[in-house]
Amino acid sequence: MNRATNQFSFYRRLACFIGLFSCLTIPPARCQNELRGSVERIKVHGKGLERNLEGDSPDRDVSIYLPPSYKRDAKRRYPVVYFLHGFTDNDAQWYGITKHWINLPAVVDKAFAGGQLEEMIIVTPNAYTRCRGSMYSNSITTGNWEDFVANELVSYIDQHYRTIPKVASRGLAGHSMGGYGTIRIGQKHPEIFSSLYLLSPCCMTPNTSQVPTPETMAKLEAIKSPEDIEKADFMTQAMFASAAAWSPNPTKPPFYSDLPFENGQPQPMVTAKWTANAPLAIIDQYITNIKQLKAFAFDAGNRDQSIAASNKILDQILTNYQIAHSYEEYEGNHINRIAERIEQKMLPFFSQHLSKR
């Protein structure tokens, strides 16, 4: 080897070293991109969603976060967290496809950038319906959303992505209506999901003493068409969505559901149906299932008063049954610290408890 060749070899090694050092110290855009995950938005057909009376498509959008190493390491498999969004939301909002108050991929990228957490795939189906939310329940009116999440979606993701296809490597989480869906589905299916994390879960306790005010009745009676729901206030929309999910009525178009009030009077049978869909009203039936879970955690802001109160009841029930769990009430409201909770609490929870093999 002559002197010129030696010099060339030396400078090539030096250039490689400088390039590596630069990537480790002041990463260029290319290096930064290697630390970011990617998002895919696909369609998944739900057999159990077919012929729902609302007329919503059974072909559902599903957003998928693939961690930074997914496309670089073709042999690696990953645990999966199924994350359920809240009422009036959709998957596109949470995944930064449309503007929203949170960008989940950016939050997850930040959490993984520290190198302390195990990478995972995150999957979110679009549960936005004609009434603005499925409640992740089985209903002839909305379709069988509980079955779609627990069975059809999990099966599809395991078949099409490099998952670790076993219960110990699957987690279920969600915010608000998604938190409700998490406990509803999770306490019934310990053979599918091993770990649950509920962020500000709504609708866990039944409201059996509610008496409608004239104003409430006027708002409900003003809804004559699906277009009216789009213009209604949040609580009126939630009432119709809950009815579609929990008290369907195939003989009652155009909403194919029964409200808990009619002509200003409570409807006891409808109220009973809603109570039967409140997770804390039926949790005792599923205690054996919950004991099979590897990990169970939930939290809420102290200014989210009714939800924080429900969390306290859940905490007491699990304590009475001597079921290990994690519960925290933090300073905050329904949405102002959710990104922080996902980054600092939820993702470390799943990193610790989901099996990596």
Image: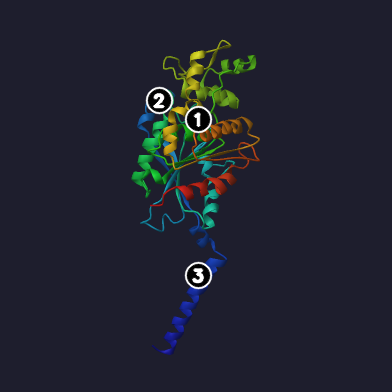
249 up-or-down from 77: above or below: above
Q: Circle 3 sits in a helix, a strand or a loop, which is it? A: helix
- What residue appears at the point 52 percent right and 32 percent down from the top-left corner? 317
Check the image and report above or below for 133 versus 95. Answer: above
Q: How many marks?
A: 3
Pick the residue in front: 188 or 223: 188
Mark-to-mark CA distance, 2 and 3: 56 Å
| Horizontal side, residue 118 vs residue 335: left or right | left
Q: Earlier in the sequence, mark 1 or mark 3?
A: 3
Circle 1 SS class: loop
| Labelled disc at residue 43 | none
Tell me which corner region of the image, top left, top right, bottom left or bottom right, holds residue 47: top left
Using a 10 Å C-alpha cutoff, classify the residue at mark 2 as few (fewer than 14 neighbours), some (14 to 19) or many (20 or more).
some
Amino acid type shown at disc 3: Leu
Q: Which residue is mark 3?
A: 20
Name the spot of residue 330 as percent of width and height, x first.
63, 41
Foreground of the two, 281 or 264: 281
The CA span between labels 2 and 1 is: 14 Å
Q: Amino acid at mark 2?
A: Asn
CA–CA distance in space, label 1 to label 3: 49 Å
Please state the horizontal and vertical placement of residue 323, each as a whole percent of the image: 49, 37
Q: Mark 2 highlights which residue?
A: 52
